[in-house]
Image: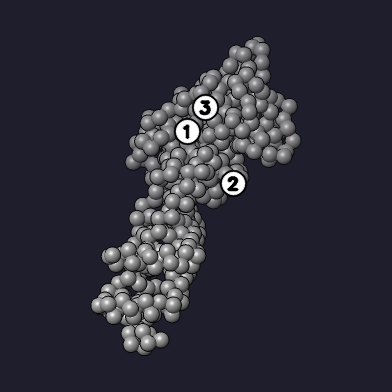
Amino acid sequence: MNLLQIAWRNFCHRPLSSLLTTLSLALGVGLVVLVLSIYGIVSEAFTRNATVGYNLVVGPKGSALQLTLNSVFYLSQPIENLPYTEYMEFFDQATRADIVDRFGGDPELATRDGKYAAFVSGGFAIPLALGDYYGEFRVVGTTPEFFSELRHGSDLDQPFSFSSGRAFETDSADNGYFEAVLGSRVAKEMNVKVGELLYPTHGDPEGKGHEDAFMIVGILDATGTPNDRAAFVNLEGFYLMEGHAKPIEEGATVVPGKQASSDKEGPIPLSIPEREVTSILVRNGNIMFAPGMQNMINESLRAQAAAPVGEINKLMSLIVGPLMQALLGITLITCFVAAVGILVAIYNSMNDRRRDIAVMRALGARRDTVTTIIVLESMLVAVIGGITGWLLAHAAIALYSGQIEDQTGIQVGFFSTSSNEIWILPVVAVLALIAAILPAISAYRTDVGSNLSA
């Protein structure tokens, strides 16, 4: 019989004590694995979703992190709104003239290029208007370019696709400006489909419902981004809802647009002075222009520009990272307590095993042989407890993989691991080795004669 078999016999000889000691270690290891996995999932969700095809988010002065959370992840509350004229600063003179011609506004807006037009040439600027809810989900007013220009996926090479229906149009002949597209999770949880009506509520999920309804014309395929949790509506229809028009200041010059003065039936879109945007998603035609444009915007009186990736990295390093480190520290303490349990369990058993050790010594076993058996017994507890804890943690992750994917868009399974998990078993083995030192010393010093005579 080799030494490992003897250690296993000793382990099985005290089944209840061995089981409880192993279970306590398994729970500690499982907690460590869960904390590492959760941190990896949260980190990937924030980092990946912060890169969705644009490099800057422009909004009112205030917290850059709040602007990012609100515009990219549809969390937090909007800081304030920007005048629509700030959005027009991203277009050249021809585009600005077309906007003024369609909707009406100050003719001076059509006489020059926007301040940031040169930086965005070859890229895009997509407006967002927030403030309403559909159930618990954000209603996002935007333009059709949101679906045609933005990309998602690890390489940002996947365009939006629809499980049913289509994107809304700038001006639909059937529904006027009142068309909506739902993210996959919104459609699933609200149990709606293409052809049904969407009634937004004003201000918060429990707010007053709007009388205006949007026809659902499309449902997006799952993207694994926050867009799965949003209901997108035509920006023109968003403006036309009650309470969304900005009062025109006295003395403002407003020339009616051709859509306001046409004989075409249907709703009349708001003029430029009545419009506001919550934020603007910007991709520069040349990424090298981004820092210069960002500095120019931040030096202006009304607007600020935030780089989503940078803000999320700050969030992870300043808030999420320290929180996860604290949780990891607590779980490591749990593992240390379990290691102390190994020490206590083996050491307490030494009194019952002194005669057995003395017999082994009398039959020719050396001191280091007896010591090795005690160390192997401790390592058995560590290996069994460590593997069991890993299996329990990953079984829990697999069990809740559906909820994790719904909340974060990240697909996880039983074998989804974090890079730091490779260190768990070595650390547990070291703790077990340390825990075995005291019982091993006690076994090493066992006196053969006195224990045999007893």
**At x 54% / y 30%, what residue is drawn?**
184
Which residue corresponds to the image point at 43% horizontal and 67% vertical from the top-left? 13
Q: Are marks 3 and 1 in contact (CB under 8 Å)?
A: yes
Looking at the picture, which amino acid does disc 1 mark?
Thr
Q: Closer to the camera, 371 or 175?
A: 371
Label 2 or label 1, whichever comes before in sequence order: 2
User: What residue is shown with label 3?
Assistant: 220
Q: In whole angstroms, how far apart are the C-alphas of marks 2 and 3?
A: 23 Å
Report if the CB atoms under discs 2 and 1 are less than 8 Å apart: no
Q: Helix or strand or loop: what does disc 2 sit on?
A: loop
Q: Does dot 1 land on a helix, a strand or a loop?
A: loop
Left or right: residue 210 versus residue 177 is: right
Identify the residue under disc 1.
223
- What is the C-alpha distance between the residues marked 2 and 1? 21 Å
Note whether residue 137 is visible: yes
| Chain-order first, disc 2 or disc 3 | 2
Q: Are marks 2 and 3 in contact (CB under 8 Å)?
A: no
**Looking at the rendering, in which quadrant would you find the C terminus?**
bottom left
Of the pair 338 and 292, the residue shown nearer to us: 338
Q: Nearer the viewer, residue 97 or 7?
A: 7
Residue type beneath disc 3: Leu
Label 2 packing within 10 angstroms: few (<14), some (14-19), many (20+): few
Q: Position of residue 271 (x, y in %)?
A: 62, 26
